[in-house]
Image (cartoon, rainbow, N blue to C red):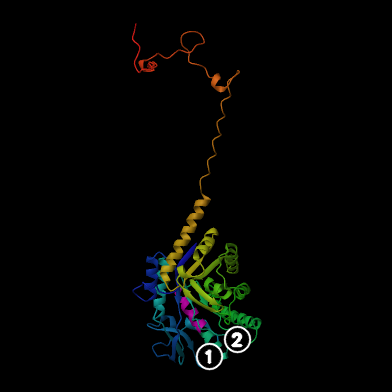
Amino acid sequence: MIRFGPAGIPLSCKGRTLRDGISDIHSLGLTAMEVQFIKVNTHTRPVTDEEIGKRPYDLPGELVVEVTSGGKAELLPDPSALTQPIPKKANATVLSWFLAKSYADLQQARVLSRAVDVHVALHAPYYVDFATSTAARERTFRQFRWAAALASALGAETMVGHLGFYGPGDHAAAYDRTREDLKEIRRWLDRLDQGSLKLGIEPSGHPEVFGTREEILALAKEIKGVVPVLNLAHIAARENKKFEDRTELHQLVDDFVEASRGSLYMNFSGVEFYGQGDFRLTPIKRGAVHFDHVAEVLAEREYDGTVISSSPLLEHDAMYMKLLYERALAKRFARKHAPPTPAAAPAEKPAPPAKGKGTAAKARAPTKGKGKGKAAAAPATRSSKPPAKPRPNGTHARKR
């Protein structure tokens, strides 16, 4: 089954909370949503006396994403601190997020999404940097941790993120560094939710940012729990391809399904690219890569996955992609179950010619009349009498 949904709250949604967005998505006939955790606004403060002994998940009106007990903060602290009672003289890092005010809001959104069968994913902050500096790397680890805490409370199946710049050195060295950082994050995620949350990594359309097609697929195959995100617009911009060749598109989708161990997570939008790394996202109908071809490829194989619309027309293009996919499914069903073509009736054999000499006309039996062997003469009528011949002087001869 392929699910379709927007990357964020639908534009037509009157409310701006997670529950409003999930309800609106269900009303539109969509079944997926990628929550956007883009802007990170936090502040750290000492815990109050009323908060001591309570779990961070139980605090009303606040999203506490980290609790530290003094000393130097760890790069990947114990995630069980979010479910344990808050000790004395601890510091709490509180997240301000307009989509949800507390873990209670996330739990309510989780219950609602499961009740209406809307699968939820969460996108971590876009600006990440593992390689430029130590401070940038620490900030990236924190953002991934906080995004994972929200995704776990929300019941998300996948947390999606980018991988930042290549940094100093060649691409091979950048790949080794990124692989080790992802392994650390993956181990921390296993401690947070026992491995139920997948870590999705996206390719990049910019050549200076980590994430070619080959790099993403290789990382997903090497690290268990890491899945590649098929962002076709980014791959098209990076490789300067429109993917009009059906065979090439089939192979691309199959590679990502194999690296994802049977499932598919796709992010799609229209794209216009003008050079390597120079592109912009557009509505699907205006893009260089057409979803009609993608829909036919998805319909030909019984894939199980999610397609997220990241175009400027969020839910509109999500519904449009769903329509194209359903049309492709209907065509495939019609071809597969078409009634057999009836066999053509054998041509009638011509009648054999009449025996005897003469032509076919002579072979026909004449109409029998009086006398043997003679045709019956038709009765003469007045109109059949020949006209009288005129005299040279124009008068008729008298009757003697």
Provide the residue span drawn in magenta. 143-154
- In front here: 59 or 167? 167
Secondary structure at badge 1 equals loop
Q: Is residue 382 left or right of residue 355?
A: left
Name the residue beneath numbered marker 1. Answer: 73
Please identify, in this view, whether the residue under mark 2 or under mark 1 is nearer the observer. Answer: 2
Residue 254 at x, y = what percent? 59, 65
The residue lying furthest to the front in this view is 393
Could you classify mark 1 by the number of other residues whose Cα lies within 10 Å: few (under 14), some (14-19), or many (20 or more)? few
Say few, some or many: other residues with alpha carbon within 10 Å of mark 2 (under 14 / 14 to 19 / 20 or more).
Answer: some
Q: Position of residue 292 (x, y in %)?
A: 50, 63
| Residue type at numbered disc 1 | Ala
Question: Where is 370 relative to 250, above or below?
Answer: above
Query: Label 2 vs label 1: CA separation?
Result: 25 Å
Q: Is residue 388 left or right of residue 296?
A: left
Identify the residue at horizontal 62%, vertical 87% (top origin). Answer: 168
